[in-house]
Image (spheres, rainbow, N blue to C red):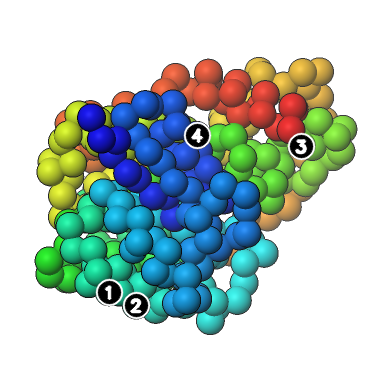
Amino acid sequence: MDKIKVIVLGASGFVGRNLVEVFRENESIEVIPGSSADKPGHLWLDILNPDTWASLTDLQPDIVIDTSGYGVVKYQQDLHLLYDINYLKKRDFLDYFVQNHPDVFWIQIGTAFEYQLEQETLTEATPCLPKTHYGISKLMFSQYLLQKPGIRFSILRPFGMFGEGEDNSKFFPLLINAQRNKKTIDLSDGSQGRDYMYVRDLASFILYKIISQTLSEIENQVINLGSGTCHSLREMAAFFAKEIPDFNAELWNWGAVAQRLGENDKFYNASTKAASLGFKNFNLQEAIRNTVKYYYTN
């Protein structure tokens, strides 16, 4: 039987890398990592460079999963680049690709930051009034997909993802590396509440829909993915502390800095739509154990 050909865009990033690794464990999938980085074994595909677009079309994939993006980490501050990568150039690329390969199923990895985050409980019906450039640009592309005729697609909006390979500037890697390097870091009081999920839960859900041949159940829909539980940063840190060798509480200096201006107190995914479609959360403590092990061994 022919394998299902899946291309993951943004495969050198945190989410894309984990999707590729999970998909490679399934023999019915031929997964091809696509990246703007010149990496061995990766298809070179740069959203900003139309000369590279034909390489994807030539492969005639069954499914494209777009995890590419800009602006999710603090050092990505170029607004022109953000809107080009997340919306303007990606829109042009989508038009080009669908024109040449109209039968593809496009899975867009969006973000909870597309919503109005002043609300504590978020569902797919929550108003989309993002306050960050990252959220605005991601929403612009989601809206383009929703209004574009003749394409099969799904928009998945994960909440706070953690796991192996997340950028070292992000909160949980900062906590882990402070312990690993025995270096004190200053933190806020950690009272902010968020919905955290293991990045491989996203990968497992998509893989399940593919191999069970039930992609039609999520076609042309927006679906939130999260744990449905709100944990504070400090609560999550306590879970991480259980898995850290020779943990030293003094290295995490809680309350030393103020919270960021305009930061929301708490929000979480209150939708059960994903669960009804087969989404499952990995055991939280085991996921944290895997994450800590990754940073201590890489």
Q: Earlier in the sequence, mark 4 or mark 2?
A: 4
Give left or right: position of 195 versus 221. right
Mark 4 and mark 2 residues within 8 Å of each other at the beta carbon: no
Which label sits on residue 177? 3
Tag nearer the camera, 2 or 3: 2
**Whole-number angstrom distance, CA of label 2 to CA of label 3:** 40 Å
Give left or right: position of 199 versus 219. right
Q: Residue furthest right?
A: 182
Residue found at x 53% / y 61%: 44
Residue wearing tag 4: 21
Which label sits on residue 92? 2
**Whole-number angstrom distance, CA of label 2 to CA of label 1:** 5 Å
The amino acid type found where label 4 is placed reads Glu
**Whole-number angstrom distance, CA of label 3 to CA of label 4:** 23 Å
The amino acid type found where label 1 is placed reads Asp
Estimate how packed mark 1 is, as few (under 14), some (14 to 19) or many (20 or more) residues with alpha carbons within 10 Å: some
Residue found at x 38% / y 27%: 26
Placement of 204 over or under 118, stated as above or below = above
Q: Earlier in the sequence, mark 1 or mark 4?
A: 4
Residue wearing tag 1: 95
Q: Secondary structure at mark 3?
A: helix
Mark 1 and mark 4 residues within 8 Å of each other at the beta carbon: no
Which of these two is toward me, 58 or 15?
Answer: 58
